[in-house]
Amino acid sequence: MVLVMENQSYNQIIGNSSAPYINLLADRYLRATNSHARGHYSLPNYLEMISGQAYEASGTANDCTPPSCGPVTGTNVTDQLAAAGIRWMAFMGAMPSDCDTSDAGGSGGYGVRHDPFVYFPQGRKNPACGNDVPSGRLLSMLNSPTPPDFVFYSPSICTDGGGDAPCSTIANGDHFLARQLPAIMATPWYRERGTIILTWDEGADSDKSGAIGDTGGHVLTIVISSRTKGAPQDRQYVDTAGILRTIDQAYGVSYLGDAARPESGTLPLDRTS
């Protein structure tokens, strides 16, 4: 599972008394201390995370909606997984219906810019559309006899901690994770060798840090599983494309776009990686 929170730099979360649960996770599981985002604005980072391309030339650097963006075409990781017979699902907080392409539910609701799958033409029609669903179905699917293998999870704006609405505070994001992650970790999906990559899409606007063209800031990334509990901190450079590179390696599919760069790094998925 890739679970994406919003708009906070590493040092805004680590040591912050408003985020006690996240700090507990960072101390208990494998913490990537040198994780950086591709750029600023949400959408390029989300697209990079599933396709290895940020599509800035198509207007994504301004968080365009699918109808207003230029072309976003090609293959993303879910196309690869489906072709390999690997089941996947994406769960979106406050999304009113499957593969919705609007900013629905008010300022604290669903932001389509956090759902990269619907920007690809294939993501707006079945079967992919039927795999991109409201997050209310998450726990029932993870508790089902046939849960998806790969999961992508974007919380609602009100619970993602990114400051995009009055309710979207670091404290609310921490409370959300303190409720939701234990429920996820109690499912058969997690107990049977599930892994959660908890990451932030970008840092604060003023944080332009990064390398190899990354300017989205220093962000927190935590790898949560039974195999990373008690693991030492990982200090190797990893960026948004490196998260995709990690997924590609885990499922044995080819590297897409920037994920082919070894410099993007990979995340250890167990203590011995």
Image: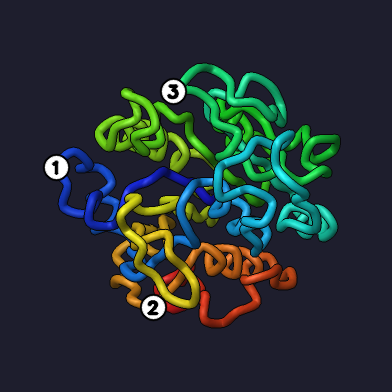
Residue in view at x 71 percent, y 39 percent: 118
Residue under label 3, please give it: 108
Neighbours of disc 3 within 10 Å: few (<14), some (14-19), many (20+) = many
Q: Is residue 146 visible?
A: no
Q: Name the kind of residue labelled 3 in the image.
A: Gly
Element carrying mark 1: loop
From the top left corner, tell me how far across and down residue 251 is, in percent: 68, 65
From the top left corner, tell me how far across and down residue 70 is, in percent: 74, 46
Residue in view at x 38 percent, y 78 percent: 236
* Comparing labels 1 and 3, the label whose residue is closer to the camera: 3
N-terminal-most mark, 1 or 3 = 1
Q: Is residue 100 visible?
A: yes
Residue under label 1, please give it: 17
Instruction: Name the mark on residue 236.
Output: 2
The residues tagged by marks 1 and 3 sit, at their Cα atoms, a distance apart of: 23 Å
Residue 183 in which image quadrant: top left
N-terminal-most mark, 1 or 2 = 1
Looking at the image, residue 209 lies above or below residue 115: below
* Comparing labels 3 and 2, the label whose residue is closer to the camera: 3
Residue in view at x 54 percent, y 27 percent: 110
Q: Is residue 5 left or right of residue 245?
A: left
Element carrying mark 2: loop
